[in-house]
Image (spheres, rainbow, N blue to C red):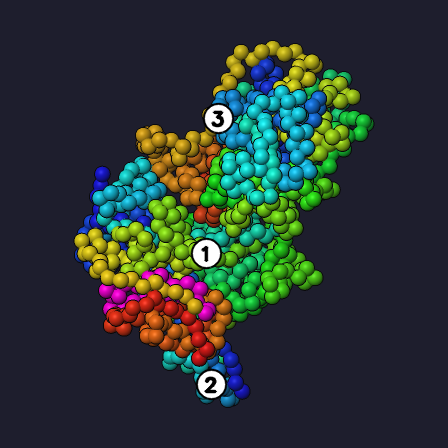
Amino acid sequence: MENFDIIIIGGGPAGMAAAVSAKKAGAENIVILERDKVLGGILNQCIHGGFGLHTFGEELTGPEYAERYADMVRDMDIPYELETMVLDVAPKPDGCKAVTVISPTRGVCELSAKAVVLAMGCRERPRGALGIAGFRPKGVYTAGTAQKLVNLEGVHIGREVVILGSGDIGLIMARRMTLEGAHVAAVAELMPYSSGLKRNIVQCLDDYGIPLLLSHTVIDIKGKDKLEGVVIAQVDENRVPIKETAKLYPCDTLLLSCGLIPENELTSAAGIRIDRRTNGAMVNESLETSIEGVFSCGNVLHVHDLVDFVSEESARAGENAAKYALGAKREKCESFDIETGNGVRYTVPVSISPGNADELTHIRFRVGDVYKNVSVVVKSGETELVRRKSRILVPSEMVDLLIKKDKLQGISENIKVYLEEA
Amino acid sequence: MIDVAIIGAGAVGCAAAMELSKYKLSVCVIDRESDVGEGTTKANSAIVHAGFDAVPGTLKARFNVRGSEMMEELSKRLDFAYKRNGAMVLCFDKNDEGKLTELKERADKNGVKGVSIISGDRARELEPSLTDEVTAALLAESSAIVCPFEMTIAFAENAYANGVEFKLSTLVTGVEKTDAGFVVKTDDGDIEAKVVINAAGVYADTVHSFVSDKPLAITPRKGEYILMDRSAGGTVSRTIFQLPTKMGKGILVTPTVHGNLLAGPTAENIDDKENTATTTDGLASVKAKGALSVKNIPWGSMITSFTGLRAVGDRGDFIIEESDVPGFIDAAGIESPGLTSAPAIGEYLCELAGRRLDMQINTDYIAARSGVIHLSALDDEHKNALIKKDPAYGRIVCRCESITEGEIRDAINRPLGATTLDGVKRRTRAGMGRCQGGFCSPTVIKLLSEKLGIAMRDVKKNGK
Amino acid sequence: MTKELTCICCPMGCALTAELEDGKVTNVTGNTCPRGKGYAETELTAPVRSVTTTVITQQGIPVPVKTKTPVPKDKIFDVVRAIKALPVSLPVKMGDVLLVDVCGSGSDIVAARTVENS
């Protein structure tokens, strides 16, 4: 059996960043396992700009961002195997992890690693899971699938488009389809606010006069073999469609941008504890899961809105995986759970052990609604660790808080993160 | 002039074709869709009914019992998924328990073995997810689940291997009686045949009326279903039926043969024979009724919903007979238990046709058929041998169901292979998982476009 | 006259308020960094956008491309048309200039990904 210090599952932005930092931290025997034919993951199809401002200090497109990391991987001689899919991860009695893979060259075989970094990314919520009534014709795509067909395969998928869901991919695809010569009739969003970034509403919808219908949803899909139209209705405050407002939009393409789900089937099967709020693994301050030596980062941990945040987080996971693989033991000291209060939907990590914390510990979370003029408060008992004022907090934007290591020393109670009126 | 023209490539039409291919006959199956099993066959409960429900003496009872007996052997010989998982019919009201006794008596009269009445507690012991409302249940050990697409494809492929011709994407526009037999008129030329079998599903009445003045009416009955992820597949192990309640006819909750959880169907008679749309109310009703049987059904793990149309005849029973026009045989009104009955109906249709034809045994008949090899079903040694032979089997295309490029290529390249996305899905399960083709469909579309020599944008999801 | 707009320089998406006099921006508030002010000034006088799209190569494989610097907003569709008309053959390297001074905008079209001829 082949033994590795670190196996990184996924060669997208998370996996590549983890590999680069693991190598920098001294791990030698690393391999990235990527199921696609190339490195880069979803970035290869994200041909729009807006990536890299934090990481590279300039605005890059997705493929450029991916290629920079892929170049780093190659320049640092980090091995990677393509068309390689991991089928199973399981802890072994000796503390190593058995990783079963399949590929055209390897066939099915078992590898072993001291540490594993989970970086499999996420998938889109499909039409079936949304429970939209109607026919099941050709012409209904998740926005990401459409993006792949248009940008990587050069397929013209349709001319008259309706988009359900205002997630970033949906907004980006509204512009993309417009530039490819299609007409986008509307973007319907169930919630009273957009789930995409504001800048994308401005430059993808407003620039092209595409209406954003907030508190609207698709209630029927017409056309037996090919899509002929969708019926859009306004919803009331309980998100129940108001039938009187139903309106038919003739179209040949419906794109769905209704949420992303971390792809944690491997994780669950390995027996790793999953956080139902994020559908990602529960991790501690070191991004380590409930199985020692297995780390998680990027969109498989929780869905990010910026790849730069993915890279930063994954670099930490890679570094910690390297430390673990090189034999560093965790400090045996108390760990404190992070509890969420008013307005905070979840946090990553879910616990902090002050003795094992880095100089700066990130707490990332999303809010459950739109909040104006609030303070984000992090407290342990009566000790206030962070207080940060915000003019506006929206569910589409992840909040990133930093806590200095010295602030954490001496805490003796669980940590609570919540919003307070400012 | 050929011997037999079969109109309709559903489970019944393909079963008849397979039976007829055991004889030296020229047979042609005609269907308006681009694949077999595109009508009622593809959207039903996928149950092999034990045979306790059909009224003794009816055709339904006769073919149900025979079909159920045949199915396991067929599944082995023709390589399609089948699992004897047992079934229960739940009773929710002490006053209704007499209805269970009635079903038990029917089972006895129909000759169905392994049927017993058990208490609510015993039912919950066997199926811990059942609700506390269950007062008693009928247990039927011989009930089974099957993959209806695979079954029908297997029948068709076996028939094809034995010389049956398939004219797909061909709409029958009329049938004319001639001195020698019939002319079946299609949008792609005429076909002359001595015998015509009408297995046209919800359109069997239209096809019947082409040659006969005797009335025959088919009403489409809409049934909506919810399919859940394999993570929910273990919710129940048996097929759970309900006795009718105040909420009307019950629905079933069942594992599928591939390990998903299925709930449905609703039952609504409609006029439009093309209306396979799901409705908000229909799906809500499935959820409400399902909750009566089983606690905490994980509706959140729904991966798709779909609608099937049952072809309900006007006699309360299957209509399987030579019509008033000699040589024109109807197989109409094949509603539940039609899927179970299909192989038995096929046998009988062959017998009816045989009365008009010279039946010489086909000595070259190939009895066995192999389906698409699923890599995930093999042990590691065989997996590696296969991947070594064809590296495409080492390339996973559908992550959710672990389906490889090799399997997809097989589904596309085999005789009577897939020509649409849904065709690939039904032969391999690629795209049938939790992401519903989000990741694999571009690759499947690409493979189809290469094989069919068409642009990717022109690759169809389903249909003609 | 005051104008409300959302800054698109970065994902923060600051809500800006700009005061205009005689077509000139005289004051900007709401921005958290200096780029917001610059954005408001350009956006309200001569708005520009970066354009990204694909060009289908002679091998039939799409290559992602972008404008090296933003182009006038009203030229977006002209720029896309010019890109779509480009004859490009693989291989292409990230950063290759495929078209100079697209539509007289002063901006070049560059390849955003290395694509080998496979």
Q: Answer few, some or many: residues within 10 Å of disc 2's Cα (few below 14, many 20 plus, some between 14 and 19).
A: many
Q: Which amino acid, mark 2?
A: Val
Say left or right for A172 vs A18. right
What chain is tagged by disc 1? A
Q: Let me know if residue A352 is in the magenta part.
A: yes
Q: Secondary structure at mark 1?
A: strand
> Do tags 2 and 1 sit on the same chain?
no
Return the residue at label 2: C25
What chain is tagged by disc 2? C
A335 relative to B458, above or below:
below
Return the residue at label 3: B79
Residue range of the region highlighted in magenta in the rendering: A342-365
Between A414 and B74, the one nearer to me in the picture: A414
Identified at 78% across, 21% down, the residue is B324
Return the residue at label 1: A260
Quadrant in the rendering for residue B201: top right
